[in-house]
């Protein structure tokens, strides 16, 4: 119906969604980063209010639970989950897929580290922490990492999950990632806007990754169709 190499309506709509995600989340992230830079890294009113409320309503059992959640959102557990997501998403070639998942997660760390180093936003006072932390505050590393991993796992579930378990497996990664982000605030190691910046950065990464995949599909599509027409 459409000439070789041209875009049909479905392809065009598929590109608008990730492009819109990048534009909206990128604009919000830019506003947040600019406001933080203008304040020289000082917390906003919402940050100090939420932080104080957490400290007044954080029983020991909640801090222990938050620690158990937060350790899954970075380091070896996060990269293992990224490898699992990449392996399942490719369906075949499991080991190359696992490596691709690890590289995808690593690609999200580069802009996060650069942005955190440029902003150099201090964390809340160390005396308020209920666990160990290092590095600058914004964007939250655990938050960004866990959300990127959740995106990879959601993609894997979308491609492999059976109908019976599909709704649960599509929802679970996002719930886990949000819980990891909240745990950073509960543990007193991040301001809420650090977590918000991590989610926005992960959303921008997801949109850009989707655009790259769509571009690759567009380039390889006509080649595949030509080969199919050979006798």
Image (cartoon, rainbow, N blue to C red):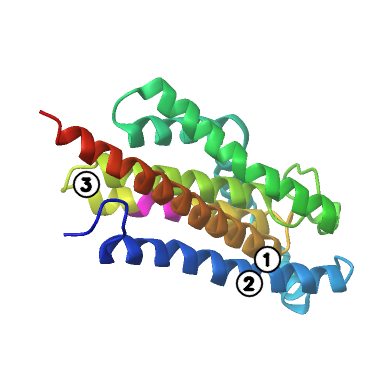
Question: Would you say the residues marked 2 and 1 are in contact, meaning their CB atoms lie under 8 Å apart?
Answer: no
Q: Earlier in the sequence, mark 3 or mark 1?
A: 3
Residue 81 image point, x, y percent: 47, 34
- Note whether residue 165 is visible: yes
Q: Which residue is under mark 3?
A: 165
Image quarter where the C terminus lies is top left
Q: Residue furthest right?
A: 40
Q: Earlier in the sequence, mark 3 or mark 2?
A: 2
Q: Is residue 172 magenta?
A: yes
Residue 127 image point, x, y percent: 85, 53
Q: Nearer the viewer, residue 130 or 216?
A: 216
Q: Which residue is under mark 2?
A: 27
The overriding secondary structure of the stretch rendered in magenta is helix
Q: Nearer the viewer, residue 60 or 153?
A: 153
Residue 80 image point, x, y percent: 50, 29
Q: Which residues are magenta?
A: 171-176
Callout 2: few (<14), some (14-19), or many (20+) C-alpha neighbours within 10 Å? some
Q: Residue at x 78, y 52 (%)?
A: 116
Q: Is residue 19 above or below residue 64?
A: below
Q: Which residue is under mark 1?
A: 192
Left or right of 22? Residue 27 is right
**What is the C-alpha distance between the residues marked 2 and 1?**
18 Å
Q: Is residue 185 magenta?
A: no
Residue 30 image point, x, y percent: 70, 69
The residue tagged with tag 3: helix, strand or loop?
Answer: loop
């Amino acid at each position: 119906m459409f000439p070789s190499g041209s875009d049909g309506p479905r392809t065009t709509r598929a590109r608008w969604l990730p492009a819109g995600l990048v534009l909206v989340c990128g604009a919000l992230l830019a506003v947040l980063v600019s406001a933080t830079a203008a304040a020289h890294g000082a917390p906003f009113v919402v940050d100090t209010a939420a932080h104080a409320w957490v400290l007044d309503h954080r029983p020991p059992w909640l801090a222990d639970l938050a620690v158990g959640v937060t350790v899954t959102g970075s380091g070896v557990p996060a990269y293992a989950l990224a490898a699992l997501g990449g392996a399942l998403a490719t369906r075949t070639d499991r080991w190359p897929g696992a490596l691709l998942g690890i590289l995808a997660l690593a690609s999200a760390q580069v802009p996060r580290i650069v942005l955190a180093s440029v902003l150099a936003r201090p964390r809340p006072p160390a005396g308020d922490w209920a666990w160990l932390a290092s590095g600058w505050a914004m964007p939250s590393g655990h938050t960004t990492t866990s959300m990127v991993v959740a995106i990879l796992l959601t993609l894997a579930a979308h491609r492999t999950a059976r109908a019976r378990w599909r709704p649960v497996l599509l929802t679970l990664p996002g719930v886990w990632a949000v819980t990891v982000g909240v745990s950073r605030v509960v543990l007193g190691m991040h301001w809420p806007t650090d977590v918000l910046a991590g989610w926005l950065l992960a959303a921008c990464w997801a949109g850009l990754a989707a655009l790259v995949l769509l571009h690759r599909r567009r380039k390889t599509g006509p080649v595949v169709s030509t080969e199919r027409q050979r006798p």
